[in-house]
Image (cartoon, rainbow, N blue to C red):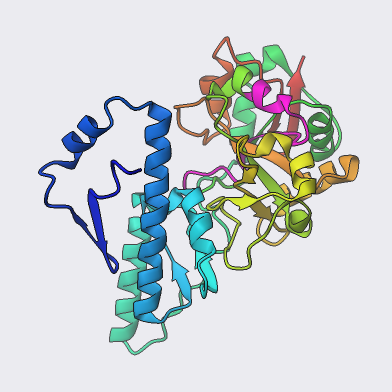
Amino acid sequence: YNALSDMIVLDGFKFSRNTQYKDIFWAAKEALKTERFDAIAGGLQDLVEDLLTRWVEAALKKTMARKLVYSGGVALNVKANQKIAKIPGLEQLFIPPGCGDESLPMGAAWGLYAQLCREQNKTVEILPMESAYLGSKVTNSDVEHILDMPLIREKFIVVEGDPEISASRALADGHVLAVCRDSMEFGPRSLGHRSLLADPRRPESVQKINEAIKGRDFWMPFAPSVLKEDANRYLDMPSTIDLRFMTCTVDSTVEGKATLVSCLHPYDGTARPQIVTKTNHSRYYDLIKKFKNMTGVGAVLNTSLNIHGKPIVSAPREIAEEILSDPKVTLSHLLVGNFFLKRA
C-alpha cells in the first residue's frame, strides 16, 4: 500500500497521475519486485477501497446527493462497495448487475430515448430494472435437444415427479446441482438460472465443486442466494444497498457463520449475497423455499455454471458439450427446464 499510494493523486473527485513518475507500470514493478503476489494484491485492494471511498465522499459533498448509481468495471469490487455503502449520509446505493462495458448499448439506447422524448415534449418513462434475467431463454426444443444427446442418454435418467422437490432433496443430501432454465442472467453473475447449487451448511461443498467441476483456487469464495425473509438471520443487512445482483459484500451474523459455512470468505466471514424474492426470482425462490422446507435453511450456495475460465453455459446442450464432456467432471444432478436428471 505504501509503495503504491502516492502514484495516483485524488483531488476532490478528480484522479490524476503523480507526475514524478514517468510510467506507473515500471515504477510499481520496481517498487514491488521483492513482494509476494498476495501482499501486492492486498495492498492494491486497500488502495482501491481508500480511493473509491474518498472519491464517492467528495462527489456526494459537491452534489449534495444522497443516492448513488455507480458503474464501471471497478464497480464489481464487492469489498470496496461494502465500504462505500457505509459512508455517512448515503441513503441508497445501486450497482447494476452488468456494470462494465457490456451495458453501454443499453445506456446509449436509454439516452437516445430520453432525447427523443424531450424533443417531442413527451414524458421520459424509464422503468427500474427489476431483474437481470434479460438473456436467451431455455425453450422446449433446447430441452429436447439435450435429453436426446448420446452422452445424456447414456449416463443420466429423468426422474419422475416434481422436479423441484427432487432437486431440493438432492441439495439436502449433499449433491451439487446444475441448473439451466428460464432466461439467462445479464452480467457476470449467475443468479439461479445458470448456476451450480449446493447445501451452504456443508464445508465440503466448496471442495466438491472445485474438484468435480470448477477447478478454482481454494480461497475464492462462493456466494449465497438467500430468501429475503431469512436475510437478517444470516447477514448484517445494510439499509443503503440493493443486494439482488451480488454486487456487494456484507458481514455475516452468528447464525450466518454457522449456516452459510461454504458461502463465506474464510478470512473475514463476509458474504457476497443474492437476496431472492418471489416477485423477481419466481422459480428460483420456489426451489430455495422447498429446500428450506426440508432443512430449515433459507439459502443455497450459488456459483456460475461453467468450468473455471470458460464462459457460463447459455443453452442446455452446452452442459454436455462444455462440462460433462470433460472426463474429470463428476457432476451427477441436473435441473434442466422442467426436468430433473441424475446419473444412472
x, y (%) of residue 321?
52, 21
Instruction: Give the residue displayed 52% in from the left and 36% down from the top.
Output: 314
Count numbered badges in the picture: 0
x, y (%) of residue 86?
54, 64
Query: Is residue 221 placed above or below 19 in the rendered structure?
Result: above
**Front-most of 237 and 148?**
237
x, y (%) of residue 16?
20, 57
Query: Is residue 270 placed above or below 114 in the rendered structure?
Result: above
Q: Is residue 281 magenta?
A: no
Instruction: Give the residue displayed 34% in from the left and 27% down from the top.
Output: 35
Instruction: Give the residue displayed 69% in from the left and 54% down from the top.
Output: 276
Residue 58 lies left or right of residue 155; in this view the side is: left
For residue 71, say whether it is visible: no
Q: Is residue 192 magenta?
A: yes
**Front-most of 246 and 313?**
246
Q: Quadrant of the N terminus?
A: top left
Query: Is residue 114 placed above or below 261 in the rendered structure?
Result: below
**Which residue sits furthest bottom?**
121
**Front-most of 331 and 93?**
93
Residues in magenta? 186-209
The quadrant in which residue 163 appears is top right
Residue 174 lies left or right of residue 180; in this view the side is: right
Query: Is residue 70 placed above or below 207 in the rendered structure?
Result: below
Instruction: Give the residue displayed 43% in from the left and 38% down from the top.
Output: 42
